Image (cartoon, rainbow, N blue to C red):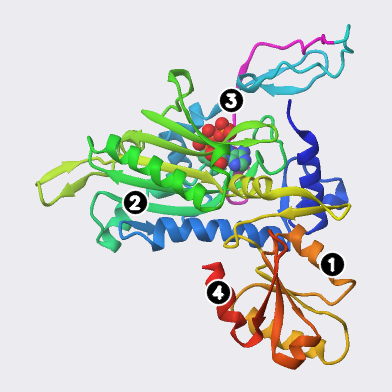
Amino acid sequence: MADTTLMDKLVSLCKRRGFVFQSSEIYGGLGSVWDYGPLGVALKKNVKDRWWRAMVHARDDIEGLDAAILMHPKVWEASGHVSGFTDPLVDCKTCKARFRADKLEDAPCPQKPSKKAGQHTTCELTEPRMFNLMFKTFMGPVEESASVVYLRPETAQGIYVNYLNVLQGSRQKVPFGIAQIGKAFRNEITPGNFIFRTREFEQMEMQFFVKPGADVEWFEQWREIRMAWHHSLGLNPAKLRWHQHGEGELAHYAKAAYDIEYEFPFGWNEIEGIHNRTDFDLQRHQAASGKKLEYFEQSTNERFVPFIVETSAGADRVTLTTLVDAYREEQVEGDTRVVLGFHPSIAPIKAGVFPLVKKDGMPEFATRLYHDLKQHVPAFYDDSGAVGRRYRRMDEAGTPFCITVDGQTLEDGTVTVRHRDSMAQDRVAAEGLRNWLVDRLS
Ligand code: ATP
């Protein structure tokens, strides 16, 4: 049974604290489209930055790219998306709802009341028909079929059509990779579960180009590296697992595929896919464009079309995962404390700075400290209400450290540092605080 209460609480916390808002809310909202508020944009950016650091900065064999969302429509014909990027759609003749035939659950049809306790009547479904998930729009002032372009449903194709450009400019050699973070769009039949499945989302994709025959080994290496990355975000390892795609599940381009799944309150679901795409994409683009997409390996004098191992994660899904994984409620002194226990490296705010009271020079000291810290880490100044309430607000924002300037500060220059998870308090010299914090965040 899905724990909908937890998701409801999380959605409401996300709105209250400024993580995520429904798009166009004052007009009643737009189905499954979400906007990131101040804390949400910071959290998602931290997730993306960590990915970029691990995949591009820390490696010698991966280059970055930012390809455009709009591409030549022939790209999507060659890639197989125009003909094959479809999901099976079924309608319920009674309640008129639409479902993805491959994701159907045996849920009661809302139009048909249950007959007996423990039994229900399910929807009366039509035969499945294939529905293409790509959004279409028109380029230029004339809305005709010749000017149809697509909003990309994956960032990968922008990498494939640029791989020789990147290779030339960067002087990389196969094996090497290209990484990209960017928006993708899919006209999902049944979006939902908050920011889990949306029609506009961001992907963090890396395509690794290898010599044919080396693909299987690299595939295994990338599986290991990617799972370790999710662990490094502080996610609970017991809630992460592998799902191997069986014959019937494999995408049209894939030779092997594994998903990294997380156990959400609504069940185990994919957050990242690792795919052995073979040379399918480059062969198709080579044939359709008439341009040679081969690689010449100097050391062996061989020419070949590289195989591709892809790691494809959703920035929004991983962000949701960090929220779900971090959420907890604790009973403290007869009160419920809600905490987002983020790994400090992804916490949107690293330090809350408070004057204990608004007098005796404490606000001035705290403001100076806050401005100094803010040059180095995202910090938040709060002087309203009891200090206990300020702690609770920072707990809900997932802030790992709160710093309070009090009477003793003015005497000996030390401040109280309160730790989010243990609620323990230390005294630290205000002077060395910046380095103390930076040490704990790195
Ligand atoms: P699903 O089976 O959930 O539809 P998929 O297998 O089609 O996903 P891929 O094409 O492998 O997904 O995309 C790679 C990653 O992009 C997914 O692991 C996910 O994190 C993200 N992603 C895909 N579709 C969506 C979506 N509609 N909303 C948010 N993220 C998405």
Query: Residue 120 colored magenta?
Result: yes
Mark 3 burial class by Cα count in 10 Å: few <14, some 14-19, many 20+: some
Three-letter amino acid code at the position of disc 2: Gly
Instruction: Between label 3 and label 4, give the one nearer the viewer.
Output: 4
Magenta residues (range): 118-146
Instruction: Give the mark nearest the N terminus, 3 or 1.
Output: 3
Mark 2 burial class by Cα count in 10 Å: few <14, some 14-19, many 20+: many
Query: Residue 416 colored magenta?
Result: no
Query: In the image shown, does 148 or 209 lie closer to the viewer?
Result: 209
Task: Tell me residue 162's x, y (percent).
Answer: 36, 52
Assign the magenta stretch its main secondary structure: loop
* Quadrant position of the N terminus in the picture: top right
Q: CA distance from mark 3 to mark 4?
A: 47 Å
Q: CA distance from mark 3 to mark 1?
A: 51 Å
Residue denoted by label 4:
438
Query: In the image shown, does 66 or 21 lie closer to the viewer?
Result: 21
Marking on residue 54: none
Mark 4 burial class by Cα count in 10 Å: few <14, some 14-19, many 20+: few
Instruction: Between label 3 and label 1, give the one nearer the viewer.
Output: 1
Three-letter amino acid code at the position of disc 1: Gly
Q: Name the secondary structure under disc 1.
A: helix
Task: Tell me residue 160's x, y (percent).
Answer: 37, 46
Query: In the image shown, does 187 or 381 lie closer to the viewer?
Result: 381
CB of mark 3 near ligand 1 (< 8 Å) = yes
Residue 223 location, quadrant: top left
